[in-house]
Amino acid sequence: MSKKKKKYYTVWKGHHPGVFETWNDCKAQISNFEGAQYKSFETFEAAKQALKGNYFDYIEKKSDFKSPLSAEQLKKIGQPNYNSISVDAASSGNPGKMEYRGVDTKTKQQLFIQGPFEEGTNNIGEFLAIVHGLALLKKNNSDKLIYTDSKTAMSWVKKKTCNTKLERNPKNEKLFELIERALNWLKTNSYKTVIVKWETKAWGEIPADFGRK
């Protein structure tokens, strides 16, 4: 069995920002810290250098992406519609600490971010992100579309349900309150916004990606 490669963790925003050598040490800095910013690196030097920079500069660098699709397939798919916003979620564990956000697809300017929530799942985050985006675009009377890379979340939104198997408990009560608000919004609002599946194999990771894979 191959030895698991060591990682180093940069925490830009947390109880104590810095570089940490174990996930448990990193987790201690971000637990119960709203808007925590962190990312893993393969070397201590890279993590230390990243600490001097901006969190979003590191999670959004996708210039080295090379699509596995053929030229014919890429031509058929075409380019993203930049009159849009992109949403995504990240979860450290399933369930685990979860957060979600939405960004302008072209500029990657962050439009909203929620979390981290102590106990959530990626599917819940993706679902909430879409509904948050729908509400924002309707409020601004915007004709932009929404990109998501989650077919599950798209299905939940379409059916106006959150079909999660996660059980409600005191640790995730706040999250379930958000789910109830999202479901109520879907059932009491109409919208014209088109929700589109992001073509990851053609375009790389969705612009709202948290870069923690």
Image (cartoon, helix red, strand yellow):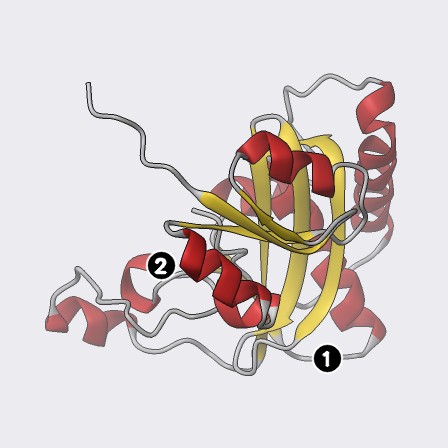
Q: Amino acid at mark 2?
A: Thr
The residue lying toward the viewer, choosing from 81 and 23, is: 23
According to the image, label 2 marks what residue? 200
Between the residue at mark 2 and the residue at mark 1, the CA separation in whole angstroms equals 25 Å
- Relative to 147, is 185 above or below? above
Rendered image quadrant of residue 192: bottom right
- Looking at the image, can residue 124 be seen? no
Instruction: Identify the amino acid type marked 1.
Output: Ser
Q: Is 160 located above or below residue 166 in the figure?
A: below
Which mark is drawn over residue 142?
Answer: 1
What residue is rendered at 80% in x and 45% in y? 33
Direction from residue 206 to residue 125 in the image, left or right: right
Q: Position of residue 196 (x, y in %)?
A: 50, 62
- Of 3 and 66, which appears nearest the observer? 3
x then y, percent, for residue 58: 50, 67
**Viewer-nearest of discs 2 and 1:** 2
